[in-house]
Image (cartoon, rainbow, N blue to C red):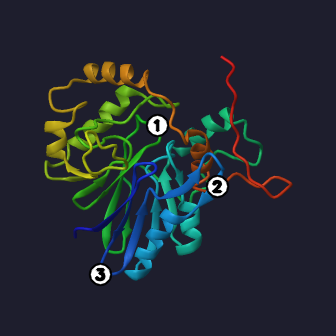
Amino acid sequence: MPPNITPFFDTTTCTISYVVYDESTGGCAIIDPVLDYEPRSGRIHTDFSDKLIDFIQRQHLSVEWILETHAHADHLSSAYYLKKKLGGRIAIGDRIPAVQTTFKKIFNLGDEFIPDGHHFNHLLADEETFHIGKLSARALFVPGHTPADMAYQIDDAIFVGDTLFMPDVGTARADFPGGNAQTLYRSIQKILAFPSQTRLFMCHDYPPDGRDPAWETTVSQQRKENIHVHDGIDEQTFIEMRNKRDATLEAPVLLLPSIQTNIRAGDLPPPENNGVSYFKIPIKTS
């Protein structure tokens, strides 16, 4: 049964969030939702997420899952906010404790932060199946961008997270803690081994040459046209390209607040004794 898929493009972070639903039952999943954050003021608001809520309520859908492909470094997740408003279970790949452990050290988080994944309602294992209404879904372990990335297959559609971009943009970086270009290449090949007409849905698009944002492609199109990993690009060539390119990239603008939120399933750091939550910024002197 093919899923109904409605995308929502966040122009600030170039992220695509999805509502995937089974029309017969009204059961739905939200994939990679975005929480609005203004770094200059520290202000958080929910305009983007409220668009998803409005759509879900108008379609009379019931949220069963809020799925994260990974702990994003370029936008804050609104999973916690959406769960409070709509219910559902927040899920992520079962390797997330490794990511939490890494960033607990980097941010020197206190004893209150236990890196065991309990912040999420469910940790999905590789090849684990679950249901969205009557739709059958499957979690696919695709590390490389981070050590804990998941893609989600729902019928003939795969939501690839930060592995692939549109063919004219290429592939995701692999230089975050625990990332690895070789591992990313092999994860991409896992996705590209699916039948040629399998639909692939991106988590981001950074349109070159003024084209409009896009987010849907196919295995066939990626194999023919992806500028980084089309057929004929071998593993070593990809690794050399990816490592060289990553060495030129700056950190994402929202890296520090994003990670501190997203390893908590979209919840903010706990308020301090004045009732205010704070993000920590490690200072580098060299």
Q: Secondary structure at mark 2?
A: strand
Residue where numbered disc 2 is placed = 43
Instruction: Kindly check if marks 2 and 3 are in contact, taking CB atoms under 8 A apart as contact.
Output: no
Q: Nearer the viewer, mark 1 or mark 2?
A: 2
Q: Nearer the viewer, mark 2 or mark 3?
A: 2
Q: Position of residue 89 (x, y in %)?
A: 52, 66
Q: Residue furthest right?
A: 273
Q: Which mark is residue 24?
A: 3
**What residue lies at 42% left-to-right and 75% top-to-bottom?**
56
76 lies left or right of 129: right
**What residue lies at 40% left-to-right and 81% top-to-bottom?**
58
**What residue lies at 77% left-to-right and 44% top-to-bottom?**
111
Which of the two labelled residues, at mark 2 and mark 3, occupies the earlier sequence position? 3
Q: Position of residue 185 (x, y in %)?
A: 31, 31
Q: Residue furthest front?
A: 210
Kindly indicate the quadrant of the structure image that contains residue 254. top right
Which of the two labelled residues, at mark 1 and mark 2, occupies the earlier sequence position? 2
Which of the two labelled residues, at mark 3 and mark 1, occupies the earlier sequence position? 3
Q: Position of residue 211 (x, y in %)?
A: 24, 46
Q: Quadrant of the C terminus?
A: top right
Q: Which of these two is toward me, 272 or 157? A: 272
Kindly indicate the quadrant of the structure image that contains residue 5. bottom left
Residue where numbered disc 1 is placed = 146
What residue type is disc 1 on? Thr
Q: Residues within 10 Å of mark 2 (few under 14, many from 20)?
A: few
Q: Secondary structure at mark 1?
A: loop
